[in-house]
Image (cartoon, grey):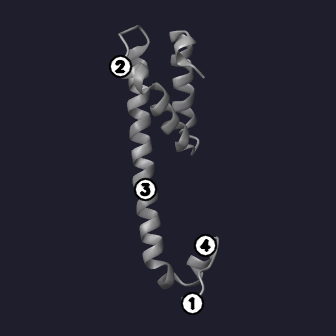
């Protein structure tokens, strides 16, 4: 989609939809929102809808960073303690590595 051809009201509507969609455990939408609308929010000349778009882009970036932090923490903890957790970790695993007691 070329954002240059889209009216400002529609840009705001689309940005809002991606922002709200991220709350449905779809943080990838927040990443797309940040990538697509960063130039619109911070590099274009000012227009009426721009402050709201900036807010959505900033909040989307914060949401992505939060998800990355939480996911990285969980992956680190799980990999570190998987063998100690025994059966519980096996039920949480998609594949069970061989050679670990």
Instruction: Provide the residue designation for mark 2.
Output: 43
The residue carrying mark 3 is 70
- Residue, x 47% and y 84% (percent of image)? 84
* Residue at (40% x, 37% y) in the render: 61
Badge 3 or badge 2: first in the primary sequence: 2
Judging by the rendered image, the residue that carries numbered circle 4 is 93
In this view, 54 is above or below 80: above
Q: CA distance from mark 4 to mark 3?
A: 18 Å
Measured as percent of width and height from the top left, residue 64 is found at 44, 43
- How far is the residue under mark 1 from the one under mark 2? 54 Å
Of helix, strand and loop, which one carries label 2?
loop
Q: Position of residue 24 (x, y in %)?
A: 59, 41
How many angstroms separate mark 1 from mark 4 (CA)?
A: 15 Å
List the residue tagged with mark 1: 99
| Front tag of 2 and 4 | 2
- Image position of 25 with respect to 42: above or below: below
Q: Is residue 51 left or right of residue 20?
A: left
Report helix, strand or loop for mark 3.
Answer: helix
């Amino acid at each position: 989609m070329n954002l240059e051809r889209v009216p400002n009201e529609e840009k705001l509507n689309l940005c809002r939809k991606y922002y709200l969609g991220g709350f449905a455990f779809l943080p990838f939408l927040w990443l797309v929102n940040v990538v697509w609308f960063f130039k619109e929010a911070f590099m274009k000349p000012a227009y009426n809808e721009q402050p709201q778009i900036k807010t959505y882009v900033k909040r989307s970036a914060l949401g992505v960073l939060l998800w990355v932090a939480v996911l990285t923490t969980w992956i680190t903890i799980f990999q570190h303690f998987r063998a100690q957790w025994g059966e519980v970790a096996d039920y949480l695993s998609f594949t069970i590595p061989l050679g670990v007691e």
